[in-house]
Image (cartoon, coloured by chain):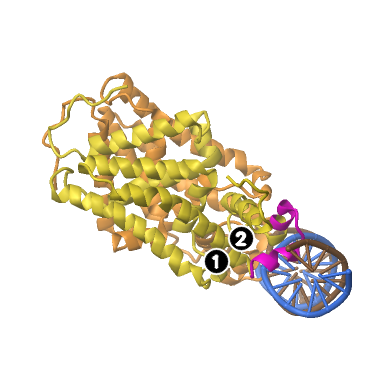
Chain colours: A yellow, B orange, C brown, D blue
Amino acid sequence: MPQVPPSSREKILSVAEALFARRGYTGVGISTVAEASGLGKSSLFHHFPSKASLYCAVLLGVLARIESRVLPALEKSGTSEQKLGNVVDALIDALAEHPTSARLLLREVFEEPDPALSAAPEAAEIDARLAGMIDGVAAILEAGVASGQFRKVGIPDLLQTIIGATVYHFASGDFGEKLLGASLFSAAAVARRKREVKTLLSNGLMPEARRSVAEES
Amino acid sequence: MPQVPPSSREKILSVAEALFARRGYTGVGISTVAEASGLGKSSLFHHFPSKASLYCAVLLGVLARIESRVLPALEKSGTSEQKLGNVVDALIDALAEHPTSARLLLREVFEEPDPALSAAPEAAEIDARLAGMIDGVAAILEAGVASGQFRKVGIPDLLQTIIGATVYHFASGDFGEKLLGASLFSAAAVARRKREVKTLLSNGLMPEARRSVAEES
DNA sequence: GTCTATAAGGGGATAGAC
DNA sequence: GTCTATCCCCTTATAGAC
């Protein structure tokens, strides 16, 4: 957290992140971001040359925050189950840290990008960094299947399920909170989410009749 | 499928469904829908009084298609595992039937609705019908836990996981296809998705050391 | 680094001819 | 039931004063 008052650039980025997460790229106008930042419309263009570049800057910041948790977790050693658990913990911590992260990530993953956005020079980098993290998780799953620690499972399908269980979950906003009857982001809800996802995966991926007396809370 | 050429209204609905699914409510203009339908902008307003009402009409059509498969599946009897499997099959069939369905549903579930949309009279009905299906699935899960056929699991969290594994999966578009290396909607991909999701859930929800020699393809 | 002013175009929606 | 023409507002972006 900044000890000094945030620069205009930081203020714009944080305001834009909140708005883009809620309403999407096309749903937010530059003027809205400017007003919420306490600036005039055209002052914004002094800091970011275009709306698309502002959006990309927001997204790169989100990716950096996620990577700072997930990439170290990918390096940890242990059984395949432990390694997968570490990554799930790290990813969920990352997504729970800022309520905007999962929403922006989910949009990036399923939404057809605006022409202005796909033309942006940062677009390729964003894709590559996302793909890098996914490849890291895929490697853990593949090793687990190859070593017999996980049953034979479709890796891409499992990746999709993991993304759904994490990114979608923390992106689900009011709908998810209505379903849970409570905040998605409270410490208790985040801890429960980690436990539920890891337990489902551990049990669901177990290769044979090797179930121990797993932790039944 | 229609034996007669589609009416303008049907043409508009199908065109709008494709566009809204890809680009979202704010990402699609009325003029785009009109042109793609082979009509002028204002002819569209003869069929739908506003953009919001067109969007709601699209969404209600999607919901009707999903309900036509999921609601009957909710009535089938069997073990909890069989009942859950039937619903997952039905839901995946429904989402695989039209590539637009999952995208529109996912938007509905995670996106902040445009003011014009939340003000629409159909909004409450859309929410209610979505909630109805979710309640039906929740009832199956609760009965399974209560009877000991499923281990003790957080129902809302599990619902979120199921939504992620189905709705998110079929909404993931190019990203998902790049991950799978093939179409999300081919008969083979759909069948595999059903199998992977049902197997993960069956194994993951099993209460104790009761694993049989589950089908390893 | 922020502002006012303006450009140039697109948005949803309406009126009225045919 | 479809069209042309129009209204008014909001959009991104630029120019230039302070």
Quadrant of residue B8 within the rendered picture: bottom right
Please state which of residues B157 and A67 is positioned toward the viewer in this rendering: A67
Circle 2 is placed at which residue position?
A: A26
Please state which of residues A115 and A60 is positioned toward the viewer in this rendering: A60
Q: Earlier in the sequence, mark 2 or mark 1?
A: 2
Amino acid bearing label 2 = Thr
Where in the figure is residue A90, as x and y percent of width and height? 38, 43
Where in the figure is residue A112, as x and y percent of width and height? 49, 63
Determine contact: label 2, label 1, CB under 8 Å: yes
Is B2 situated above or below A195? below
Is D7 situated above or below B140? below
Residue at (24% x, 45% y) in the render:
A77
- Magenta stretch: give its range: A33-49
Q: Which residue of the protein is positioned furthest toward the top in this rendering?
A: B147
Magenta stretch contains residue A50: no
Q: Residues within 10 Å of mark 1 (few under 14, many from 20)?
A: few
Please state which of residues B49 and B108 is positioned toward the viewer in this rendering: B108
Is B186 situated above or below A204? below
Where in the figure is residue C6, as x and y percent of width and height? 84, 75
Disc number placed over residue A114 in the picture, else none: 1
Where in the figure is residue A95, as x and y percent of width and height? 46, 44
